[in-house]
Amino acid sequence: MSRPRQTTGPVSEFLTHHFRHFNAAALVDAANGYRAHLDAGGRMMVCLAGAMSTAELGLSLAEMIRQDKVHLISCTGANLEEDVFNLVAHDFYERVPHYRHLSTADEQALLERHLNRVTDTCIPEGEAMRRMETAMLEVWTAADRAGQRHFPHEFFYQVLLSGKYAEHYQIDPRDSWMLAAAEKNLPLVVPGWEDSTLGNMYAAAVIRGDVKNVHTVRTGIEYMTWLAEFYTETTRASSLGMFQIGGGIAGDFPICVVPMLHQDLQRDSVPLWGYFAQISDSTTSYGSYSGAVPNEKITWGKLGADTPKFIVESDATICVPLIFAHILGW
């Protein structure tokens, strides 16, 4: 049964009235296509690249999760952890609006204050990273002693759902997409998790001997084998779409599950992705896959000729909250 169309609020009405051409029109088309995919009973994967968690995308993504408009997330290790960093240490963050004019001496001064800069935002090492290292060491070592193995996001869910760190929350918890995901036990895929702050901390814990079994945290290939079964089972009943924010591994990794199922496992009855949109300012020059137009993916067996395809060549920190607002009817 299709879902009823929701009413639209002032943001949606503004977009519909003013965003009529070029990237603006593509933004509205992508949002309408997303809504149409859900209305037809489809499900959606959102891919988070870049530093969208530090950009506080949780302000809109958390509500998308609560309203069942996101059914799977693929994200980088940085996006996995940085939403939680912000949750527990927001008051200690510092914004540097003049970041383009920082000298090397200015950067060194930030380092000496243990402030790690992401464009115009500085993440406090002690209050954010080390606080989470302490929390994660507890669950990593407990699992290691018990001979248990879990994915990176499952360890985060354990920490968040334990409630032990709620006293440290410094934003409205409804604005944390990771907390919303944990409460729904939303499936996550985190390819290349090792390339993250907590991935480095886990490696250090293994080197120190705090964690005896390096495989206590499950990673890449196991994520792909899990995704293969999830995709196969989900698409028996529902079309699965892909909404990609930025480029890189967060999108490249999961989209490949379809050609793998077809070409390597000979599961010819598994459908292609049922919707595709990408928000990126990357270009196709120098062979950039992140900026490749969606039609190129047809040749790789990822999308079909009739798959609804959208690309918005613009800043995701501006575009994605507007798209989510339109989908939510705000």
Image (cartoon, rainbow, N blue to C red):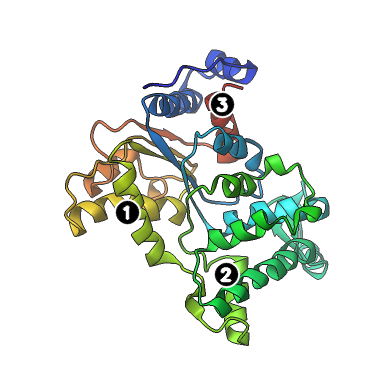
Answer yes or no: is residue 121 visible: no
**Picture residue at 64% right of the left edge, 42% below the top:** 58
Q: At label 1, which amino acid type do we have?
A: Glu
Q: How many marks?
A: 3
Q: Does label 3 or label 2 sit earlier along the sequence?
A: 2
Q: What number is the disc on residue 229?
A: 1
Residue under label 2, please give it.
199
Q: Does label 2 or label 1 sit earlier along the sequence?
A: 2
Give percent across and percent down for residue 176.
66, 45
**Picture residue at 37% right of the left edge, 32% below the top:** 42
Asked if disc 1 and disc 3 are in contact, CB closer than 8 Å, the reply is no
Above or below, 184 against 19 in this view is: below
Q: Distance from label 1 to label 3 (Cα)?
A: 29 Å
- Quarter holding the N terminus is top left
Between circles 2 and 1, the one closer to the viewer is: 1
- The reply, left or right, for residue 283 in relation to residue 100 is left
Disc 3: CA contacts within 10 A as few (<14), some (14-19) or many (>=20): many
